[in-house]
Image: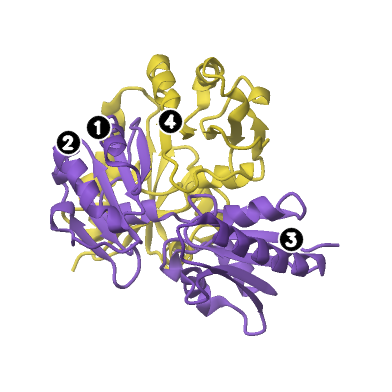
Chain colours: A purple, B yellow
């Protein structure tokens, strides 16, 4: 009988924001797997580190830093094969996922390669979006508002149209797109409605009005904007 | 010294989907508070029930079932005053919130009444949106897709426009709006891309292609739709 594949959301970074279920699965894991950048650090593993059993086998999926998709897809092919070998041997595999596995997560690349062959369960996690709203001290969306999640790499004109038509907006994957996003919000007259959050829930968390945000933002940063609410920063 | 107010997200319903932090705060609580419908059951309390200390004081905020806003606002006034009395006496108060406190949550009504007067912390939780994606076995949003969260009560024409312009969509608060939402998705040719989820993560969870969804949906139901993905139901 084959093992079971678990895609486990770990939340935004504070280990205490993982779920009881994630904690139980990790603390009892025979095999864990996680992505790491070029064989270096894995943010997902660092969130779970204190709960990983000492005798647990580890599958590190080394993702090359490249804009080309082929090298990353090859890495997921290799990672999926390593995971499949454990599953075939009857061992469960817990894949560690930052945030939530199905919310802009790389777990989908393993899911698409394995879920049709092995019993698979996805354990949802706290997303960075609600963690950022908590850090900001401001509701993300209320009552019958529409909430739009926009990735930072979007082209400037499209972003202006999308945000112009939106009510509450979370812009994720800000990173090197911060200057562009700021221009868009300024041109729409909404810079003062926007807050900037960096590394939500981690010790080095930063929360600032967008106008005071640094010019260089790390990948794990976000901008939340709610139109027409009371002033809130 | 006054106590501290905590707004604590409990996740979508399975008690194991609460965070370690929520669990710690509830298990150590002197005072908990939660909304209940007309003084009856509280879904939030039921999620946390097994972890609530026996000697814990409880503030049940009885929300009248009425479309008028004044009676509910009066109830939150009363609840906020009861909570403030505990905070003034130096006791921390843990407010139990379904899902995430700042994601379409009623906690905002207490936050707006109390957060400027008392130290306040919001603990994010797993939202029903990612729990529904996990139940469906389908990524909610990937790569650079835009994700739009639309409340079910939206007028039909506006809903058609919004979904027509969207990529990945989560329609929340489905309930009695199911027939309308189905019409909208049919008219856009996207019924087959949509999944229906009821009571995600609870023992009575239901997951169905939208075409097979019942005509009557409970309040805690959701429709997820992703355009242009591979077939997935």
Quadrant of the frame with the N terminus of chain B: bottom left
Q: Chain of mark 4?
A: B
Label 1: element kind:
helix
Q: Chain of mark 1?
A: A
Disc 1 vs disc 4: Cβ atoms closer than 8 Å? no
Label 4: element kind:
loop
Q: Same chain for labels 3 and 2? Say yes or no.
A: yes
Q: Nearer the viewer, residue B219 or B63?
A: B219
Q: Position of residue B167 (x, y in %)?
A: 46, 34
Mark sitting earlier along the chain (3/2): 3
- Eyeballing the image, is A116 above or below A14? above
**Where residue B166 is drawn, which disc sits there?**
4
Return the residue at label 1: A164
Spatial CA distance of label 3 from label 4 is: 34 Å
Q: Same chain for labels 3 and 4? Say yes or no.
A: no
Spatial CA distance of label 2 from label 1 is: 7 Å
Mark 1 surroundings within 10 Å by alpha-carbon count, few (fewer than 14), some (14 through 19), many (20 or more): some
Q: Chain of mark 2?
A: A
Mark 4 surroundings within 10 Å by alpha-carbon count, few (fewer than 14), some (14 through 19), many (20 or more): some
**Where residue B115 is drawn, which disc sits there?**
none
The total of numbered circles placed on residues is: 4
Mark sitting earlier along the chain (2/1): 1
Mark 3 surroundings within 10 Å by alpha-carbon count, few (fewer than 14), some (14 through 19), many (20 or more): many
Disc 2 vs disc 1: Cβ atoms closer than 8 Å? yes
Q: Same chain for labels 1 and 3? Say yes or no.
A: yes
Return the residue at label 3: A4
Q: Does any portion of residue B121 appear in the rendered image?
A: no
Instruction: Please tell me which residue is depicted at 51% across the width and 77% down the height of the picture.
Output: A49
- Eyeballing the image, is A57 above or below A127? below
Quadrant of the frame with the C terminus of chain B: top right
- Eyeballing the image, is A85 above or below B128? below
């Amino acid at each position: 009988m084959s093992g079971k594949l678990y895609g486990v959301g770990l939340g935004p970074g504070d280990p205490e924001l993982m779920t009881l279920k994630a904690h139980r699965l990790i603390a009892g894991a025979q095999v864990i797997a996680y992505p790491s950048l070029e064989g270096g650090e894995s943010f997902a593993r660092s969130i779970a580190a204190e709960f990983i059993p000492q005798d647990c086998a580890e599958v590190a999926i080394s993702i090359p830093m490249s804009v080309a998709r082929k090298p990353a897809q090859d890495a997921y092919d290799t990672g999926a094969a390593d995971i499949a070998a454990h599953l075939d041997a009857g061992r469960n595999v817990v894949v560690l996922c930052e945030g939530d596995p199905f919310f802009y997560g790389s777990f989908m690349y393993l899911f698409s390669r394995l879920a049709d062959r092995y019993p698979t369960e996805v354990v949802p996690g706290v997303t960075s979006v609600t963690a950022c709203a908590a850090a900001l001290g401001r509701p993300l969306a209320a009552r019958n508002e529409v909430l739009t999640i926009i990735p930072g790499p979007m082209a400037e004109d499209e972003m202006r149209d999308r945000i112009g038509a939106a009510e509450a907006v979370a812009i994720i994957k800000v990173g090197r797109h911060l200057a562009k996003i700021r221009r868009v919000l300024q041109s729409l007259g909404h810079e003062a409605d926007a807050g900037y959050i960096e590394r939500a829930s981690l010790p080095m968390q930063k929360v600032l009005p967008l106008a005071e945000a640094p010019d260089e933002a790390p990948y794990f940063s976000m901008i939340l904007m709610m139109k027409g609410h009371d002033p809130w920063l």
